[in-house]
Amino acid sequence: RQEKTRMPPNTSKSLGPCPDPPPGLKGPFNVDFDYKRTLDEVRKNIERTVSRHRGVSTYCTSLDSVAIIIAFRNRHEHLKHWLYYLHPILERQQLDYGVYIINQDGEGVFNRAKLMNVGFVEALKEYDYDCFVFSDIDLVPMDDRNLYRCFQNPRHLSVAIDKFNFQLPYGANFGGVISLSKSQFLKINGFSNTFWGWGGEDDDIYQRVIFHGMSISRPDLVKGKYKMIKHVRDLHNEQNPVNAGKLRHTKSTMNKDGINSLKYTVKEIVKDILYTWITVDIQAPL
Ligand code: UD2
Ligand code: MN
């Protein structure tokens, strides 16, 4: 287990807790995806205070240790934008955080939810996180008061996306960016592993939360603004017509399909200052 806080220069005294809310937040800001970035530019731009992938505030003990998990395959342009915008935001939020890119190996059918489960398990092998943010790679918040933290209930963070005219598309919407504490996530047995292809897995985890007696917490539509990078549906992630029907069975399958039934093989782990990159074989059908 690694140390959780870092001492400021020339001090050995233990640090006080970070103030709540974080004092250095900016509120709303502009987000623009037109500029083409390289990973090296992003690395240089982000003057990390620590020489490892995890951001730890130098002057106080973070209130939360947060793993940010992203299901990924072949979205390198999006990744650069996400890293460019999110690192400074997460630093301003004074989080003790790590970013995990869970890269699906091979050309099989994509499975966002199963990759998220892998991220949860692998992040916990690396550090004692107590909070997990599960995010799409193409969603960047437009206001840093939208805290990448955990709350009394599972939280839906991406409530006001430009693509949906900054409105919640439907009341039970739980896609995009969500946060759950370790215990909230374990209580619902994580995501389902069985949603192959596009759609449904977000509604399934919504139902898991509700069926376990919890509710959804959300920021307001001002702080919860997001910009989504425009894209077409990826290859090997077609909408799966089977998925919608599966939602009728969430209640009877959720306690045996999830973290407790997860099987995968890690192919490669690469640690970068910007993220931990984990390539994984999830036994995807072709
Ligand atoms: C919606 C949801 C998303 C998820 C998805 C259905 C919102 C805002 N987002 O997004 O959370 O529920 O529908 O599965 O409601 N990805 C890759 N490579 C691929 C395919 C997907 O990296 O080849 C990842 C990437 O992080 C992406 C995410 O999976 O952001 C969701 O896929 P999408 O962006 O194609 O789906 P979208 O925008 O309809
Ligand atoms: Mn998307």
Image: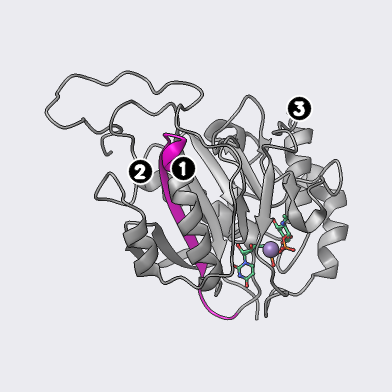
Q: 95 above or below 275?
A: above
Q: Are marks 1 and 2 in contact (CB under 8 Å)?
A: yes
Q: Dot 3 lies on which element?
A: loop
Q: Earlier in the sequence, mark 3 or mark 1?
A: 1
Query: Which of these two is toward me, 283 or 89?
Result: 89
Residue shown at the point (58%, 81%) measured from the top left: 107
In the rendered structure, find residue 90 and report the number of the disc placed on it: 1
Disc 2 residue type? Gly
In the rendered structure, find residue 233 and report the number of the disc placed on it: none
Q: 18 above or below 227?
A: above
Disc 1 residue type? Leu
Disc 3 residue type? Gly
Which x, y percent locates residue 240?
Answer: 80, 70
Residue shown at the point (69%, 72%) measured from the top left: 231
Q: Which quadrant would residue 5 be assigned to in this image?
A: top left
Q: 165 above or below 198?
A: above
Look at the image and say whether residue 106 sits in the magenta stretch: yes
The residue tagged 2 is 55
Q: In the shown orientation, is residue 206 left or right of residue 109?
A: right
Residue shown at the point (72%, 46%) measured from the top left: 205
